[in-house]
Amino acid sequence: MPEIAKLILNGNTYELPVVEGTEQEKAIDIGPLRDLTGYITLDYGYKNTGATSSAITFLDGENGILHYRGYPIEQLAEKSSFLEVAYLLVYGELPTTEQFANFEKDIRNHTLVHEDFRKILDGFPASAHPMGVMASMVCSLTAFYPESISNRSPEMIELTILRLLAKMPTFVAWAYKHSIGHPVNYPQNKLDYCSNFLHMMFGLPTEEYAINPEIVRALNILLILHADHEQNCSASTVRMVGSSKASLYSSVSAGINALWGPLHGGANQEVIEMLEAIKADGGNTQKWIEKAKDKNDPFRLMGFGHRVYKNFDPRAKIIKKTCDTVLANLGINDPVLTIAKELEEAALNDEYFISRKLYPNVDFYSGIIYRALGIPTDMFTVMFALGRLPGWIAQWKEMNENKEPIGRPRQVYTGPTERPYTPMNER
Ligand code: CMC
């Protein structure tokens, strides 16, 4: 017997179907609601609203579970590579050896970007925030591949996916090189995805850059952990923009902008800035915990809390462990790690954070690793974007293949009711 929800409105009873996902998540399908009743639902921040059904990522915030296409994040972080996870997210299954070899080869074929991108880059002040630069560069791909704007054939979409995955590390590294006034490095196609990225970021024409396998492994883990997170702000943005039939390039560019905000991906930069500020202030973590609790103080403990996780963020657990390993392997003693651990301990034992179920999220420890890898603070959110790219692509592709309608929420209007226009000289 299928489950049915009953809504009683003004004495009338309406029946609404219940939809159940493969992990027994349930939703009331309100599709017919407005037609039946004339009412809409109101849900600020979409806290209770499922905007789509999706087969990509499963997230159980109460139990701290995260799966990509059914595979637990812990197993992927331990055993897989970022590129393999990208394949899994985009195409739905782990690749065979042959499928992976072809995928890697295709990606390598597209790592170069048009030389004119150097001119575009030169137009930005060196001080430009790299997230703005990245969003612009990705959107500019529409100018270099104009056929991608209107050609929505599976072949064109496939080519666009490969180009995006292949060129993004080049853009990230070039944005960084531009910001520090160094010459850009061209991709080295003999290297794997992450090693190539590190070569472009840190190589210099004057000396050989030695690839450290510890750093390559840590980078793979970080990118895997960021690769998708179901219908978050930037993924929803990508789907929303794509639903108007905008191209994958412009949709991903919009996703980069959504990620930039400090409540989303921008939090990783803010965490390290917060930890530095606490250090400069004498390292009194309790004082900052009190600030975070004070409703008259706008300060929030960055890297803490999550819309969906009301238990430990499983990504934060892995990142914390990776952070300890990376710093030990590289022989780095970063004093902000001690401050971060003290803050976490204090918050996890504080009634304010316990009652609101606020735990460290993915951004709390990631910045400390990025810094140990030599990545500057204002590039942290760009690293998040590099990791999230396969997720955005998978979300866009699913939306497109499911032929989802244009995203167009409604509203409850609260402005003035009709009134006549008054000429300016009478106001
Ligand atoms: N520090 C202090 N108080 C907090 C924090 C925090 N980091 N996060 C939430 N709260 C309080 C908030 O003040 C509210 O208290 P009250 O009920 O007394 O008004 C309560 O907890 C619920 O917060 P909310 O803002 O209604 O929760 P939300 O689900 O809308 O927001 C969040 C989720 C992630 C935006 C929020 O926890 C936050 O601002 N965290 C800091 C920023 C951050 O780390 N963002 C990265 C998120 S994970 C990576 C990603 O998705 O990009």
Image (cartoon, rainbow, N blue to C red):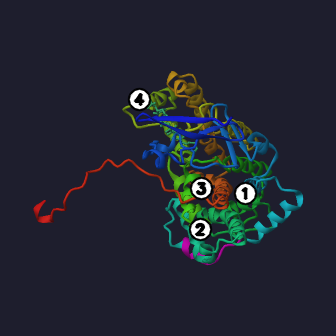
Residue at mark 4: 294
Residue at mark 3 to residue at mark 1: CA–CA distance: 20 Å
Quick check: marks 1 and 2 in contact, CB under 8 Å? no
Calculate the distance from the C-alpha at mark 1 to the C-alpha at mark 4. 43 Å
- Residue 319 lies left or right of residue 424; in this view the side is right
Q: Which label number is shown at residue 247?
A: 2
In 3D space, how far apart are the residues under numbered discs 3 and 4 (Cα atoms)? 31 Å
- The answer to which image quadrant residue 102 occupies is bottom right
Amino acid at circle 3: Val
The relative height of residue 342 versus residue 369 in the rendered view (above or below) is above
Q: Earlier in the sequence, mark 1 or mark 2?
A: 1
* Position in image of residue 419 (x %, y %): 21, 56
Q: Which residue is mark 3?
A: 382
Q: Residue at x 56, y 67 (%)?
A: 246
**Dot 3 beta carbon under 8 Å from ligand 1:** no
Query: Is disc 4 in contact with disc 2, using a CB cutoff of under 8 Å?
Result: no
